C-alpha cells in the first residue's frame, strides 16, 4: 500500500544491522493471520453447505431470507471498503482530518451493517428460525454471527484509531496502523462477498 | 524493495470507479438470482460475479496488486488451501458418507 511502499522503499527488508523492518514484519503477520482466517471461515461455510437442507420442522432458507434487505446491507459493507481505502489514502498524505472523517464513516457503515444483521436475526427468530431449530439454523447463525463479530471488532478498531489520532501521539506510525486495520476490514468485506453469494443468493 | 512490483498507485478517483463497478456487479447478481431464465446457469454466474468482486477488493482496495510478492504468496496459500481442504470435506461428507 502507499504508506508501506514508501516505508519499504526507504528501508529494504533487512536493515544494515540485520534487523527486519518492523513495518514489513507487521504486515507479514497480518497477511498470515488473514490467510488463516480463510480456513476459519472456510470451515464455517463448509458446515453450512453440508447442513443447509436439514431444516427439521423449521423454515428453510427460501422461507425466511429477504434478499433485497440483505442486498442493501451487502452494499453498505462494500461501500465501507471504499471509505476505508480513502482513509488509508488520506493517512498516506498525512491529512489527518480527512483520515478521521473516512475512518468514522467506515465505522458508521459497519454499525449500519451490524444493525441490519440484528434486525434480520430478530425477524428470523420471529419466523421460527432459531439457533436450535435445525442444523440449518445452527450453521447459519454460527457463520453469520462469527462474521458479525468480526465486523464488531473492526468497528471498535476503527473508532479506537480515530479517537487516538486526535491526540496526535501516534502520527509516526499512524499510516501503518490505518493500513493494518484496513487490511482486516477489507478481509471482513471479502468474506461477506462469499457469504452473500453462497448463503443467500444461491439458496433462494 | 527487493520483491515489490510497484508501477502506479491508485488514486481516489480509481477507488470510486471500483466502488461503482462493485455496485453494478451486485445489482447484476441480485437480478440473476431472481430471473427464472437464468436458473440453469445461476450458480456458475453468481460464483463468477462474486469472484470478480472479490478480486477487485483484494487487488485494489487491499492493494495486493501493488504490494510485495510475499504478501500475495501468503494470501494465496490460504485462498488455495481452503477450497482444496473444504472441497475434500464436502466430497467426503456430502458424497462418500452422505446422510
Image (tube, coloured by chain):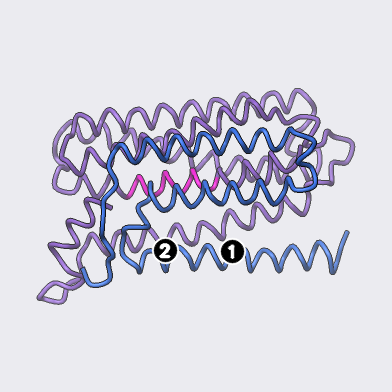
**Colour-to-chain, purple:** A
Mark number displayed over residue B82? 1
Residue at the image position 51 percent from the left and 56 percent from the top: A37
Residue at the image position 82 percent from the left and 36 percent from the top: A60
Residue A113 x %, y %:
52, 30
Residue at the image position 24 percent from the left and 34 percent from the top: A99
Which label sits in the foreground, 1 or 2?
1
Q: Quarter of the image containing the C terminus of chain B?
A: bottom right
A29 on left or right of A7 = right
Chain where mark 1 sits: B
Q: Is residue A89 magenta?
A: no
Task: Tell me how far mark 1 sits from mark 2, CA to CA.
Answer: 14 Å
Which residue is disc 2 drawn over?
A: A32
Mark number displayed over residue B40? none
Residue B62 x %, y %:
38, 50
Magenta stretch, overall SS: helix
Work out whether A90 lies above or below A32: above
- Say if mark 1 contacts mark 2, CB within 8 Å: no
Q: Is residue A184 magenta?
A: yes
Q: Colour of chain B?
A: blue
Q: For the magenta stretch, what is the residue range?
A: A180-191
Amino acid at each position: 500500500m502507499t504508506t508501506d511502499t514508501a516505508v519499504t522503499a526507504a528501508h529494504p527488508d533487512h536493515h544494515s544491522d540485520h534487523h527486519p523492518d518492523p513495518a514489513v514484519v507487521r504486515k507479514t503477520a497480518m497477511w498470515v493471520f488473514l490467510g488463516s482466517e480463510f480456513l476459519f471461515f472456510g470451515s464455517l461455510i463448509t458446515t453450512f453447505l453440508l447442513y443447509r437442507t436439514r431444516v427439521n420442522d423449521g423454515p428453510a432458507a427460501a422461507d425466511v431470507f429477504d434478499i433485497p434487505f440483505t442486498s442493501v446491507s451487502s452494499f453498505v459493507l462494500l461501500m465501507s471498503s471504499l471509505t476505508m481505502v480513502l482513509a488509508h489514502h488520506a493517512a498516506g498524505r498525512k491529512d489527518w482530518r480527512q483520515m478521521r472523517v473516512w475512518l468514522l464513516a467506515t465505522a458508521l457503515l459497519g454499525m449500519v451493517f451490524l444493525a441490519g444483521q440484528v434486525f434480520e436475526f430478530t425477524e428470523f427468530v420471529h419466523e421460527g428460525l432459531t439457533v436450535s431449530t435445525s442444523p440449518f439454523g445452527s450453521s447459519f447463525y454460527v457463520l453469520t454471527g462469527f462474521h458479525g463479530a468480526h465486523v464488531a471488532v473492526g468497528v471498535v478498531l476503527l473508532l479506537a484509531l480515530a479517537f487516538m489520532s486526535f491526540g496526535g501521539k501516534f502520527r509516526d506510525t499512524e499510516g501503518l496502523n490505518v493500513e493494518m486495520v484496513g487490511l482486516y476490514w477489507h478481509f471482513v468485506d471479502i468474506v461477506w462477498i462469499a457469504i452473500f453469494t453462497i448463503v443467500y443468493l444461491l439458496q433462494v | 524493495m527487493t520483491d515489490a512490483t510497484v508501477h502506479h498507485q491508485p488514486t481516489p478517483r480509481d477507488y470510486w470507479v471500483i466502488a461503482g463497478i462493485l455496485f453494478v456487479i451486485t445489482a447484476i447478481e441480485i437480478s440473476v438470482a431472481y430471473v427464472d431464465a437464468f436458473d440453469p446457469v445461476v450458480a456458475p454466474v453468481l460464483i463468477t460475479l462474486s469472484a470478480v468482486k472479490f478480486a477487485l477488493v483484494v487487488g485494489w482496495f487491499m492493494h495486493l496488486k501493488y504490494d510485495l510478492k510475499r504478501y500475495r504468496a501468503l494470501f494465496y496459500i490460504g485462498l488455495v488451501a481452503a477450497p482444496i481442504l473444504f472441497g475434500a470435506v464436502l466430497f467426503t461428507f456430502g458424497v462418500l458418507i452422505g446422510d
